[in-house]
Every structure is written in structure tokens, then in C-alpha cells.
């Protein structure tokens, strides 16, 4: 079948026709024709894809009028045509392609050999994302970007302009698509008839941009399909496609097979880019047993309605031997979420390689970091051996790198449920800048610092309206760490911190003597809180001193308002040197309906501290509050 002569429009350079000489000499016609006839050469290789071949150009007629262009494909097929040229051979082989240009000054030719066949491809067409969406991930009338990339067989982008034929087959009452760019730089609507586009016009070489728009009144079923190829009417082996499937029941997407899912290679960039390219409301469901090595982490920039359900994610990065400059922003979170809303991370495992303990050089290599994300859900997730926090709830900041001093938004309305964190080098869960969080059924063990930390480092940070309901915090391998299981640290005045409730929790083997440690900075004036602990059990760790007068408190409050009710305190050391509480800096500490056992004393407070209690205390056998030792 002859396929020559079906040109779609004039396009960009891949072969060039030049003329010899710039002016007519006073010679005879034969001499003039020889001097000024056009000369043509192949400036770039033709593009081969299986049995198809194409090349793109605009002839530069420097002498005389524009004439004709003829191509002989070397298989007995030839025709007069304009660019772009394309052809499909009947069988694999090597063929001489001859290009002849003719005008009123004469003619010129150029010849090159092309080898076609399944193993001879020089151009590979692919579309990203793959697919753009399925099963209702785009809402009515919503648009999504699609990029066609022309690469070589080694997956490297081509460095010259190449022709791409694009077609679009919508479902009945389906969506629409436009692509950029034609040779003139304009966009072209796509339809079932292939349209030739040129790569590298407004995009990098080898790329064409498409805007796909879902139907404003989506049908109940069917698919909108975009197809890219090096020649029109290409078969499946010569083309690549992506589709939007309409469905009343959303269907999840799986990462493409080109992204290693056996943890054999670092796929941080490729998997991260694929996730960022997904349209709003997409659901990702990796295949059963999928494991992704993400040493540089997965950056999710302003996701909207994204759900990632399943998979194992390994970060094998270790601490650098040295560091430059100040600050502690070192290490990459496995999931680094920048802004966005309605994100769900569920049914997954996140693994690091921290051998244990806190290491400042990797302080921010957390399992999951939310930065000003709204309405996020983290559910049924296991996080082990990260260098940083298990989960960090941070603010979204200004500046191009989102590390500026101004907070644009706090993490808001986060839900964390059925989460296990073991071996985190810093905190289990760090509440840095949070306007609302519900934490349910969380187990934290063997962390380097605190199990739960309300961390207000800057004056415009803090946590409000946080509830932790049902948790276990333990450190059986590290029973003498320096800080409390639940603490409030940082450098801000504390007025952004309040309404924190911890209930139905068990704090076992508390870090370094204390179960609860709530402090504000020495220069602060605002009390932190209120904090409420209800129906909790605290097993306070062994003290490090030999006298009750210098023993630390199981509860330590300096600059906060704290209520502990219906809770139980145990001190398990054989030498009872620990107090139930230590109170400082005008704080208010209220006990109601609590029980304490095994302590050497009730507690101590500064003259401005206030302790109000209706609780019992049986550490010295008296059964009253306060006992004589207080």
C-alpha cells in the first residue's frame, strides 16, 4: 500500500535544502542551472518505529521559487509530497531513501539508508501519565495535562524536533483534547483523524503537550483514548496510548511496569513524577507485594484527592559523613507532602535503615511529613526504623522553596488511625503546626526522643484541637532516654498551643523518669494548654538519683495548664526515689480521680505553682492526698 503523499502540514527541521551561490552569473542557462540548482541533505536521522519511518522539515528555498519535493522510499513506492514525510514498509529490512527537490533552477538529491523492523526502532513514543485517569478520577469538565515524549530505545529524550501524529477517540458524549504545537506554534484540536504535531516548539525537544478535558456530562461508561505515533494509522506495535475510562465505580491505578516494584533500584524520581502527574481524585493501588525503593523520598506537591492504597516503601539512605552549613533539614521523608487536600495514605509499610537512636544529621528523614495539608488521612500504616519522626505534621511556608519564615497554612484536620511506629530516631508523631488532628489506635515504640511531641519551634507554630484516643507508647529497648513520652517543647511563646487531649493511652517505660513533660521556654509568658489526660496509665521509668529530694517527677509541668483525671501512675523501680509530679513557673496541675503507686513522694512545686487534687495516693501506704511526704 502506498502511504506517500499524505502530508498533513509543513513542520520543523530534520532535513535541509540549501542553494549553492547567491546571484546569477552571466553564463549560459546550463551553467546557471548547475550553479544555482538546490542542494538537499539529511540533517538528522529519520525516525524509525517498527516498520514505520518518518522525518520532518521545512525546505529552505534560497534560490528561485519553491518547487516540488519527491521521496523514493526504496521499496518501489514514491510520491511527490510536502512535509512531514512518512511511510510504512511491508516487511523488515534496510532500504535506501532518496529525497529529490526541484525548482526552476534545477534539482538536487540526498540519499540515506533506513533499517526498519521490531528491533530497529530509533524512536519510541510514550505518554505520561499512563494512563491519565481511570474510573472517575477526573471530575466533570476537569482538565489534566498529558505529555508525549519521543525517546530513543535507551529511554533518552531525542534532541531534535520530531513529528508526532496524534489522534483522539472519545467515548459517546466523552471529553476533548488539544495539543501543542503545530509548525506555526498554534494548538490543534485532536480527533479520530491523525494530526501531525512537532516536538520541541514550546516544549523541550522531543515533547508535545496535550490538554485533556473530561466531559462536562460524563457518560456512564466508555473510554476517551489519546494515541501517539510516528506515522498516522500506525498499528498497536508502533503507537502508544493513554485513556480516560468512564465508570460509575472508580477503578484504581497501578504504577507502570517501567517503575521497578521489587526494591531493586531507587525509583524516587520516576515514581514521584508519575504520582505528581496524576489528575485530581486519583486512586493508586500498587500490585500485591509491590516494593518501591525511594531513597530520595516521594515528593507530592499539592495533591488533590489522591489516595495511595498499599505497597512497601523503603528508604535505604544513611547519614552523611559530614554536613555543611547550619540547620537540621537533612534527610528526605519517604512521603514528603507539600500542601494539598484530601490525601489518603493507607494499608502500607514504610521502612528505613536507622540502627537506633537520634541522629541530628538525619533529623527530618521521617516516614510521612505533611506540610500544611488539609483533611489528610493516614490509616493502617506501619513505619519502622526511620531516622526522623514516624509522622511529622508541619506548616506550609512561603518562598519558592516553602522554607520561608511565614506560615501560609497549618496542617488541618488530619486523621491518623491504626498506625504502628517502631524505631523512629526522633519522635513518634510530631505536632509542629496543627489546627486539628484526631489520632486513634496508635502504637509507638523504641523512639529516639518522644513518642508524641507538640513541637512549637517558631512563634507562629503550635498545635490546637488535637485528640489522641487509644495509644500505646513503650521503649523496652531504651528505658533511660532523656525526655518524656508526651512533651511540649520548642521555642515559641506557646499561645498557639492548646486543647490537647490524650485519653485511653498506656505510657510504658517512660523516657528518663517522666511520663508527661510539658514546658514553655524560659522567656515565655503564655501558659501552654490546656492539656487533658483522661483514663490513661503511666509507667514511669527508673530515676537516676539516690535521694527523693532530687528525684524527677512522673509528671513535669513548667508553663502549662494540665488536668489528669481517672488515670493511674506506677513507679516500678525497687528504690522509690521518684515523685508523682514536679510543677514550675506558675503552672496549674489538677488531679481528679487518679491513683499512684510505688513513688517516694507526692511531688514538689514552686511557690507560684498550683496543685488541685481529689486523687488518692498510696505510694507510702497512707491512701490520702497529699501524703505526709508532700
Image (spheres, rainbow, N blue to C red):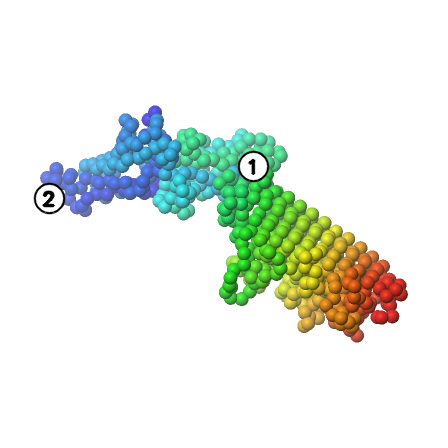
Relative height, residue 149 to residue 219 (above, below): below
Q: What element carries label 1?
A: strand
Q: Which of 335 and 141 is in front in this view?
A: 335
User: Which tag is nearer the camera, tag 2 or tag 1?
Assistant: 1
The crowding category of the residue bearing disc 2, from other C-alpha atoms within 10 Å (few below 14, some 14 to 19, many at least 20), is: few
**Residue ID at (83%, 60%):** 594
Residue 134, numbered label = 1
**Residue ID at (59%, 55%):** 354
Q: Report the residue that reaches farthest toward the bottom.
A: 607
Q: Is residue 338 left or right of residue 88?
A: right
Q: Where is residue 126 in the image (x, y as percent from the top left)?
A: 45, 39
Q: Which of 424 and 413 is in front in this view?
A: 424
* Residue beneath disc 2: 26
**Residue ID at (13%, 44%):** 25
The answer to whether one can see residue 433 in this image is no
The crowding category of the residue bearing disc 1, from other C-alpha atoms within 10 Å (few below 14, some 14 to 19, many at least 20), is: many
Q: Nearer the viewer, residue 318 or 459?
A: 318
Q: Do the residues labelled 2 and 1 touch (CB within 8 Å)?
A: no
Q: Position of residue 378 (x, y in %)?
A: 65, 48
Marks 2/1: CA–CA distance? 70 Å
Amino acid at each position: 500500500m502506498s502511504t506517500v503523499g499524505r502530508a498533513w502540514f509543513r513542520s520543523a527541521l530534520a532535513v535541509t535544502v540549501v542553494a549553492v551561490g547567491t546571484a546569477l552569473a552571466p553564463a549560459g542557462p546550463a551553467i546557471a542551472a548547475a550553479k544555482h540548482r538546490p542542494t538537499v541533505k539529511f540533517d538528522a536521522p529519520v525516525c524509525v518505529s517498527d516498520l514505520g519511518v518518518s522525518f520532518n522539515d521545512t525546505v529552505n528555498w534560497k534560490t528561485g521559487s519553491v518547487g516540488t519535493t519527491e521521496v523514493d522510499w526504496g521499496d518501489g513506492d514514491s510520491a511527490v509530497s510536502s512535509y512531514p514525510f512518512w511511510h510504512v514498509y511491508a516487511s523488515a529490512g534496510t532500504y535506501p531513501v532518496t529525497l529529490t527537490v526541484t525548482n526552476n533552477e534545477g534539482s538536487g538529491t540526498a540519499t540515506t539508508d533506513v533499517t526498519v523492523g521490531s528491533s530497529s526502532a530509533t524512536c519510541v513514543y510514550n505518554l505520561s501519565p499512563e494512563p491519565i485517569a481511570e474510573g472517575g478520577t477526573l471530575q466533570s469538565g476537569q482538565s489534566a495535562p498529558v505529555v508525549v515524549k519521543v525517546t530513543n530505545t535507551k529511554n533518552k529524550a531525542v534532541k531534535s524536533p520530531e513529528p508526532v501524529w496524534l489522534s483522539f477517540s472519545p467515548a459517546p458524549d466523552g471529553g476533548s483534547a488539544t495539543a501543542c504545537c503545530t509548525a506555526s506554534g498554534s494548538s490543534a484540536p485532536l480527533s479520530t483523524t491523525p494530526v501531525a504535531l512537532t516536538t520541541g516548539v514550546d516544549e523541550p525537544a522531543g515533547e508535545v503537550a496535550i490538554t485533556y478535558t473530561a466531559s462536562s456530562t460524563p457518560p456512564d461508561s466508555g473510554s476517551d483514548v489519546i494515541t501517539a505515533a510516528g506515522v498516522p494509522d500506525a498499528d498497536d506495535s508502533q503507537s502508544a496510548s493513554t485513556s480516560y475510562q468512564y465508570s460509575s465505580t472508580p477503578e484504581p491505578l497501578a504504577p507502570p511496569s517501567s517503575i521497578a516494584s521489587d526494591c531493586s533500584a531507587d525509583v524516587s524520581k520516576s515514581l514521584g513524577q508519575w504520582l505528581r502527574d496524576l489528575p485530581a481524585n486519583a486512586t493508586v493501588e500498587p500490585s500485591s507485594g509491590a516494593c518501591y525503593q525511594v531513597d530520595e523520598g516521594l515528593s507530592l506537591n499539592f495533591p488533590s484527592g489522591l489516595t495511595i492504597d498499599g505497597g512497601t516503601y523503603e528508604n535505604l539512605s544513611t547519614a552523611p559523613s559530614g554536613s555543611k552549613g547550619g540547620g537540621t533539614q537533612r534527610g528526605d521523608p519517604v512521603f514528603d507532602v507539600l500542601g494539598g487536600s484530601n490525601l489518603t495514605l493507607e494499608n502500607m509499610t514504610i521502612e528505613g535503615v536507622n540502627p537506633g537512636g537520634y541522629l541530628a544529621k538525619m533529623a527530618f528523614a521521617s516516614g510521612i511529613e505533611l506540610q500544611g495539608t488539609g483533611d489528610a488521612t493516614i490509616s493502617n500504616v506501619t513505619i519502622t526504623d526511620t531516622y526522623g519522626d514516624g509522622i511529622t505534621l508541619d506548616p506550609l511556608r512561603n518562598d519558592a522553596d516553602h522554607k520561608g519564615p511565614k506560615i501560609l497554612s497549618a496542617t488541618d484536620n488530619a486523621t491518623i488511625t491504626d498506625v504502628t511506629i517502631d524505631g523512629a530516631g526522633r519522635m513518634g508523631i510530631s505536632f509542629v503546626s496543627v489546627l486539628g488532628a484526631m489520632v486513634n489506635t496508635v502504637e509507638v515504640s523504641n523512639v529516639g526522643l518522644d513518642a508524641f511531641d507538640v513541637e512549637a519551634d517558631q512563634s507562629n507554630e503550635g498545635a490546637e484541637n488535637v485528640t489522641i484516643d487509644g495509644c500505646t507508647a513503650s521503649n523496652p529497648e531504651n528505658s533511660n532516654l532523656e525526655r518524656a513520652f508526651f512533651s511540649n517543647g520548642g521555642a515559641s511563646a506557646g499561645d498557639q498551643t492548646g486543647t490537647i487531649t490524650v485519653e485511653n493511652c498506656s505510657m510504658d517505660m517512660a523516657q528518663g523518669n517522666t511520663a508527661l513533660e510539658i514546658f514553655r521556654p524560659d522567656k515565655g509568658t503564655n501558659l501552654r494548654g490546656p492539656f487533658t489526660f483522661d483514663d490513661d496509665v503511666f509507667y514511669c521509668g527508673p530515676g537516676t538519683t539516690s535521694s527523693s529530694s532530687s528525684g524527677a517527677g512522673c509528671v513535669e509541668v513548667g508553663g502549662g495548664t494540665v488536668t489528669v483525671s481517672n488515670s493511674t501512675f506506677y513507679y516500678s523501680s525497687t528504690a522509690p526515689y521518684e515523685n508523682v509530679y514536679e510543677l514550675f513557673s506558675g503552672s496549674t496541675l489538677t488531679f481528679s480521680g487518679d491513683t499512684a503507686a510505688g513513688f517516694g513522694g507526692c511531688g514538689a512545686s514552686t511557690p507560684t505553682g498550683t496543685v488541685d487534687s481529689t486523687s488518692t495516693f498510696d505510694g507510702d501506704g497512707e491512701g490520702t492526698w497529699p501524703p505526709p511526704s508532700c
